Amino acid sequence: MSFVTELKRRNVIRVALAYLALAWLVIQISETILPLFGFDSSAPRVVVIFFGVAFLPILILAWTFEFTSEGFKLDRDVVQTSKEVARSSKTFDRVLIVLLVLALSYFAFDKFLLSPSRESAAMEAVRRQATTEALEWLENRETRATNTIAVMPFENASQYIDDAYIPKGLSDELRDQLGRIGGMRVAARTSSVIFQNQTLSAPEIAARLGVAKLIEGTVRRQGDVLHITVTIIDGESGFADWTKTFRKKDNDLLTAQQEIATEIVALLMPDSDPSLGRSTLATLDASANELLQLARIMFQDVKDQPTVKVEQLLNAIDLYRQATEADPSSALAHSRYADALLYLGDVESAGVAIERALEINPNLSEVQNTLGLYRWIRFEDGAGAAHARAIELNPFNADALAAYGKWLWHQADTDASESYFLRALVQDPESLLRYTDLGNFYGVSGQRDKALEIAADIQERFSKSPEKAVAFLVLARIYELVGNLDVGIAWAMRSRAADSEYPDALWMLAELYARIGDEEGARYFDPDTSFNNLYWLRRYEEMIEVGDELVLENPNQVQIWYGLARAHLALGDYEQAIYLLDRQGLPENVFVDTRRANGIEALMTYADALNANGQTEKAHEFAEFVAGIWSRLILTGSQKAWWPNMYEACARSVLGEDELALETLERVVESPGLLWYPILVDSPCFQKFKDEPRYQAVVQSVELRQKILRDRLPDTLQRFRVVP
């Protein structure tokens, strides 16, 4: 106690606190100021080290010397009265208070002003770099970085049909196994398997995938021995750099995977750890390995089909479950099990599986990506963080890149999301899904020229592929998004001709005809007039009758509930609209970082209904939130899109900012896309302007565009040589 009393008397504690406050303040300021004068990132570390080293000497000086009215003197030479001690303590207290106030002020300044701007600048730098790299690659497909490889589908050279799964599973697992090795970029599966039945040369395939090496293989059975021949082919010359045959018993594929990966890594990355080939295996259990391969092939086939084969999906899920039982310690087995369950819609079971995967190994890109998908479906915060972590663990995970791009898009950060869509396409350049994501992104955000460039790429790459029916429908959607609904109809016709059993083509045709105001055409392709088309045709009472039946059959289809709410709002049944949206978790589901664009639209419907129902306080709160999101979108790459301008205009109307609402609404006339006519004419937030000439001009402009599209449709269909 006497020592503590002496510390207080000599003001050592006060000096220590003041020193720490000063040190923190100087360190924080140095991190901001020093880079402006050309210092690198090591400069702030030097400042930290300086204050750390000086701390103990400062305390010794505080113990040894005393501050008096005559300056600093040795403590033993100073005789102070109690008043002088109190005066000295007060001086140090004032200094300490000033430093603490300065530190707290800078903390607030940094948190609320500097940090957001720094994060924005950092994101902009990342976006620029990623976009530049992606665009350079797209423009020059011959550019191939070191250690970039593509694992092609292995061939079955056996006469046994039952062995067909072995080369498929082996090449898929090897591709993933190598992809988990830092420093090695492996082309995504979708882009690799597309060349399986094509006659392109090795240099042509390598150029299209942007890789330096191709890995090919064959599997041939002799009795119970599998002869697995693996070849590394140079992407420039097309000649084999290395070939080796591995002979393994058919129950020893796991050892084969390990040895093949070890040899490849040693050849392509000679300075790497030799154990990498084993450490990145999905499982060390042979039985679990075989089950994972079988499940993966079956599940991939489900995802490759335009319609879900439920029975096959259930079989794949059962195989994944068996794999987790065969090897309970495999994080990837649990993660893939969770992924398949999410695809089925069994979110609760998927949650148990992904939690187990995280307990085993959270540092796997696939595990983190599945966690992000799970959180997204559950409306839980943290989906973006999980996808970002997946990318950090594997910068070439195309699924994680695309998922993070979508997440950023829903945070109203259009500019940043573009770079991740581009990076996903770079990693998976032959995947229709990646082109679809990017085309939809450009179309929805009003970037017409870029959307049309993607459409041209899709047409060139997929017009003769097995996926052409789906590709043509993707083209129909892109052209619809950029306002060329007549061309969209023509591509939907081609999709229907390519696969008469593909129901989505008929639904798209009916929707597009309804969108341009051609009820007869819509009825031709949708004789029973489905729920969606009743909306486009503004037949709200019939829409509600159909929707009430649909929600009984599909209670988890949130789009049906949102559509019903819009119908009730248009009919003036505000309380029912509010009730329906309350049941779907609004507004809470929009106040999380896993919100959806359709959820934000539904919140605008909610605010509009509340306002029309006299509940103005809540309506204004939600409208303010919506307006903020849409205005950010407009500022970050979606300036020409109709939907953020239209919904912001509705929000401004609810807030009573009528002049700003009309000014914002007028911008939709310049949008390349065709806005949703029922919202424009039937929403209460716009109905208040029905006698306003500026509003009437917008309505007339939309109706004129619909007429122009109807008038030019026959010529467009003739040009595309398609008929209804």
Image (spheres, helix red, strand yellow):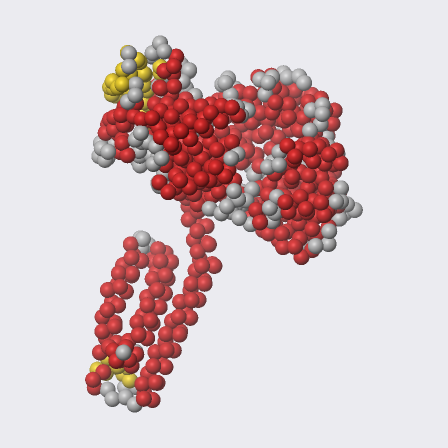
Report the side of 4 relative to 489 (left or right).
Answer: left
Q: What is the x, y in percent for residue 201?
A: 36, 16
> Which residue is painted at 73% across and 51% down in the image?
613
Q: Say which of 589 and 264 sits in front.
A: 589
Q: How many labels were placed on the picture?
A: 0
When asked about the image quadrant of residue 223, the answer is top left
Q: Residue at x 35, y 55 (%)?
A: 35
Q: In this orientation, does residue 223 appear?
A: yes
Pick out the residue farthest to the right: 691
Q: What residue is rendered at 25% in x and 89% in y? A: 79
| Up-down relation of residue 384 to residue 33 (above or below) | above
Is 597 situated above or below 478? Answer: below
From the viewer's side, name the closer residue of 114 and 493.
Answer: 493
Q: Quadrant of the C terminus?
A: top right
* Residue 38 screen position, x and y as percent: 33, 54
In the displayed structure, 713 sits above or below 451; it is above
In the rendered image, residue 521, in percent from the top left (x then y), is placed at 71, 24
Q: State the image quarter where residue 645 is shown.
A: top right
Q: Quadrant of residue 99?
A: bottom left
Quadrant in the picture for the N terminus: bottom left
The residue closer to the viewer here, 610 or 551, is 551
Q: Residue at x 69, y 35 (%)?
A: 548
Residue 259 drawn at (x, y percent): 25, 26
